[in-house]
Amino acid sequence: MKKLLTLFIVLIMFMVTGCTRKEEPIIDDLYTISIETEGIGQIATALGDEEITFDDEFPVTSAYMNAPAGTQVKMAAKQSDQEWMFVKWKKNDMDFSTETEITVTVDEPVSYVAVFAMSNGYDGPTASSIEEARTIGDILGLPSFGYSASEGTFISAFELNGTIYRAVADLDSDKFATIMDLQFDDPDHDRKFNEIVAPLEIKQIDNVSENIPDQSELDKNIGKTGGELLDEGWTYTYYNLDNSEFGMEHGWYSYVVVFDGKIEYKEDLDIEKAIRDLKVVSITHEGVSSALTDPIQ
């Protein structure tokens, strides 16, 4: 005899929040599954034999459900913006799959993230391995974490085969001036930009993924004050005062830092001043920072 299922699904949509409840007897041992997006893109979910359907009018970017063990959940990711491309699924912050559609069986509380990265519309051949990345053109078609151009240096951050890298190339003053003269509202902006930077020879590649600090190293910051972090070069990026959570960057990486104490919001709130005396309760790696594309000093 089949076990009755009780499912509570909350879909948080872009611009619209919906709630659906199926009224059936409550069953023990429900596991919470969260499905999120990173970057710009949309997701869709389905249970069992149900078909996955995307809502293009109100794209879903986040979903939560409670389901008993053994439930099959389908998840799919899709581009909602031409300038962002699907990269992979992460499960509990670990790389899980590069397929746009996955099916999983519920057996524990778990979080999935559909990762999207920027794309600059390059349609030329791209490297299939890091050894093949000899020019900027070899990496232009790969998922991007941004680039920077300065007189003398061009830096691009990208992902290849699940690993994040940064590539550095020389950029002469004439090419730099040409890039600066490009107009962002020009329909041919990307094509013109790609033509300039594609031939640049890569002189240095850094493996960003292999240098992410492990949790034991991050935990050494527990007990430090916000002032100590700021004095060590950490920078503040965003906050969630309800949970005392703060986005912070240090070096090539971004983190979620939770402080003790409670900060009340006010119009002239100075976050850096407010956290100086608070102490770190927890700290976790979140992703890469803007420093990935900072010019080399």
Image (cartoon, rainbow, N blue to C red):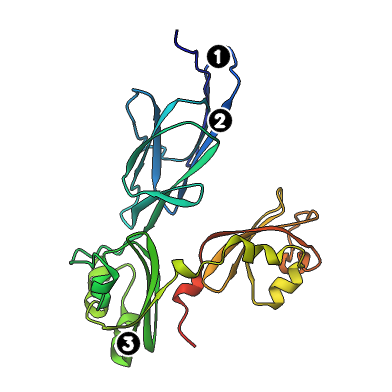
Disc 3 marks a residue whose amino acid type is Leu
The relative height of residue 25 versus residue 284 in the rendered view (above or below) is above
Q: Position of residue 110 (x, y in %)?
A: 52, 39
- Which numbered disc flags the more N-terminal residue, 1 or 2? 1
The relative height of residue 87 versus residue 70 in the rendered view (above or below) is below
Residue for badge 3: 171
Front residue (pair 237, 186): 237
Residue for badge 1: 23
Q: Position of residue 290 (x, y in %)?
A: 50, 70
Query: Quick check: marks 1 and 2 in contact, CB under 8 Å?
Result: no
Q: Please tell me which residue is depicted at 78% across the width and 62% down the height of the picture.
A: 279
Q: Please tell me which residue is depicted at 35% across the width and 23% down the height of the picture.
A: 50
Q: Position of residue 179 (x, y in %)?
A: 32, 80
Q: Position of residue 187 (x, y in %)?
A: 25, 65
Between disc 2 and disc 3, the foreground one is 2
Disc 2 marks a residue whose amino acid type is Tyr
Mark 2 neighbour density, 10 Å: few (under 14) some (14–19) many (20 or more): some
Q: Please tell me which residue is depicted at 50% across the width and 51% down the height of the picture.
A: 93
Query: Quick check: marks 2 and 3 in contact, CB under 8 Å?
Result: no
Residue 123, numbered label: none
Residue for badge 2: 31
- Which numbered disc flags the more N-terminal residue, 2 or 3? 2
Between disc 1 and disc 2, the foreground one is 2
Disc 1 marks a residue whose amino acid type is Glu
Q: Which picture quadrant has residue 276?
A: bottom right
